[in-house]
Amino acid sequence: MNKIDQLKQYIIKPQAIHQLLIIFAVLIFSIPSFAGTTGKISGYVTDEETGEPIVGANVIIEGTYLGASADLDGYYSIGNIPPGEYRVIFSAVGYQKVIVEKVRVNIDLTTKVDLKLNSSVIQLNQEVVVTSQRPLVQKDLTSTSVTISSEEIRMMPVESIGQIVNLQAGVIDGHFRGGRSNDVAYLIDGVSVTDAYNGGFGVQVENSSVRQMEVISGTFNAEYGQALSGVVNIVTQSGSDKFEAYVTGYVGSYFTNHSNIFKNLNRPFFTNLFSWDHNQSSSVLAQKNIQLTLSGPITPVENLYFFVTGRYYQNNGYLYGQRIFNVNDDVPFFPNPSDQTFWIPRNTGDGAYVSMNPDRKYSANAKLTYALPELSIMYSMFWDDNENRYYDHGFSLTPDAIMTHYRTDLIHNLQFTYFPSSNTFHTLKFSANFYDYKGYLYDDYPINNDPLSADYNPYGIDPRYVNPNQGVPTSNYTFRQGGNQLGRYNRHTNTLLAQYSYSSQISKEHKIGIGIEGKYYEIFSQNKDIINLTAGQLDSTGIEIFTPGYPNKGAITDQGSWIEYTRNPFELSAYVQDKMEYDIMIINAGIRFDYFNSNASLPTDLRNPRHNPLYPGAIEDPNNPGNYIL
């Protein structure tokens, strides 16, 4: 055995046991599973006078294909109902028809509607309309959760899903019950949209796209995985038979008398009212927002509905810098270094105010739904494109020197739902999620490796970048007087997901759900700094020669670093869950299986991987036997 083969024994690698786990999961979970995007209506239908059950009474949800018939005990149950408010029609031969309005269905919960029907002979065949009353106590609420409807969201003074989440008890700035923000699982229409790189919410869902949202902050059911502190479960809007369109928008700004702290916020209100340039000091409209929403049927195709919303948002921010220095400027020049009372300034700025925390966003959410009596096909798309900068106090007098951050997110979601009965349904889901992030001051130039060419540029670096040492003040306690930020990054997370689901109300007391899901990731991350390859070398005038370049890939130096990697992990998960509903209690019991393969190798000694006698070039430390050095 050679030295390299021996070295592999000290490396932890994934084992082939995952093949057995896959077979195990397929065998056990060949039964379909349940997804938390719908609710249920159930209850008893009885005679008003005798109290006897009305066998065969029809219960229909108006405007849908969903309905059920009462059994020998007068009991009925309708599952797979999208969240929202409905009109439920009760009818039976010889009895008066009753319509119950404002029956609210919540995600993963059961809405009880018990009804007593009167004889149609007594009531002269008149139709009765009643309003459903919400119970004081939701008995099957076995977790700490809050359900927010689309109507409630429209009444809230909020602009984003994150702000809605932060309004809930136990949540502060996206942290649930003191946990970290990446301990929260985010789902849209039952599919995870968490960015695997950092555990964050990876896409912009507009408030108008939300049909209902559930925020869970404790005691999760087995269907929810990778949630240590919270779950945000969003069900989006679908089109209907009614065509709807509306436009919303607003403008606003920031004003303060404390202009010594918040510069450029004491502008006259009517000065350049319609300026859209965040670099203009006189622009008064700091915030501009407009959103268009359309929904309705696609008339050439029966039972085909659409929903689409688009938004443009710009915020110039409230943190301004003043352009005293430009990027190419430098610290003052002292002709006589021993005489600090006389200097020659080298600033060329025009003194204009520049926003240092602007934010611009485009977003679009769209959904197509094809609904048949036993089959529903749904495709949805979520896209957003973002551009922003973060305030850097050190560059507040050189505000053009800070980098811009770019983010583009795209999610495709395709779902097939088959419901052979009112209490049983299957769902097959496919999702492709793409999250792309990058940040830089100037974009890359084309690479030119010809040293004889006038535009020779082997690293593709924009020539506007200046020496890392330029503009650095003589004192570390003052502002930069020129220069620029030199870091840049590029990363993306691509996720492919497949999920098969089934749920069945096998009896009045038991609702069984079993599920299986697989995910495959591609995670790429690159962070590198522009450095001076000729640092310390001076020209004939004594000025340091600046040759822009990058460190070697994988290097970490005092000047900068270049860290880059690509990973392709995958995971499998499955669960079995039983919701037991009794008169005196509700029990949610389940078991979950999760398997994760990082598809990577790690040193056995993470504290010091050099403590390995088989590392190439390792030498035992004579002063510390048993330890090895390079």
Image (tube, grey):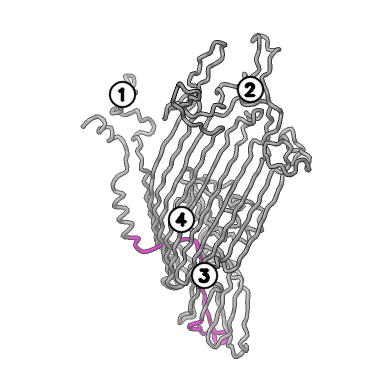
Indicate which disc, 3 or 1, sits on the residue closer to the N terminus.
Answer: 3
Residue located beneath label 3 in the image: 302
Q: Nearer the viewer, residue 59 or 471?
A: 471
Predominant secondary structure, magenta span: loop
Callout 1 secondary element: loop
Q: Residue 17 at x, y = what percent?
A: 29, 48
Up the image or down, 257 lies above or below 347; here it is: below
Residue located beneath label 4 in the image: 224
Q: Nearer the viewer, mark 4 or mark 3?
A: 3
Separation of residues labelled 1 and 4 (CA atoms): 48 Å
Q: Residue 488 at x, y = what percent?
A: 51, 33
Q: Which mark is residue 117?
A: none
* Residue type for callout 1: Gly
Residues packed near mark 4 inside 10 Å, few (<14), some (14 to 19) or many (20 plus): many
Q: What residue range appears in magenta? A: 28-57
Residues packed near mark 3 inside 10 Å, few (<14), some (14 to 19) or many (20 plus): few
Q: Which mark is residue 329?
A: 2
* Residue type for callout 3: Glu
Q: Residue 37 at x, y = what percent?
A: 50, 61
Indicate which disc, 2 or 4, sits on the residue closer to the N terminus.
Answer: 4
Residue located beneath label 1 in the image: 617
Separation of residues labelled 3 and 2 (CA atoms): 66 Å
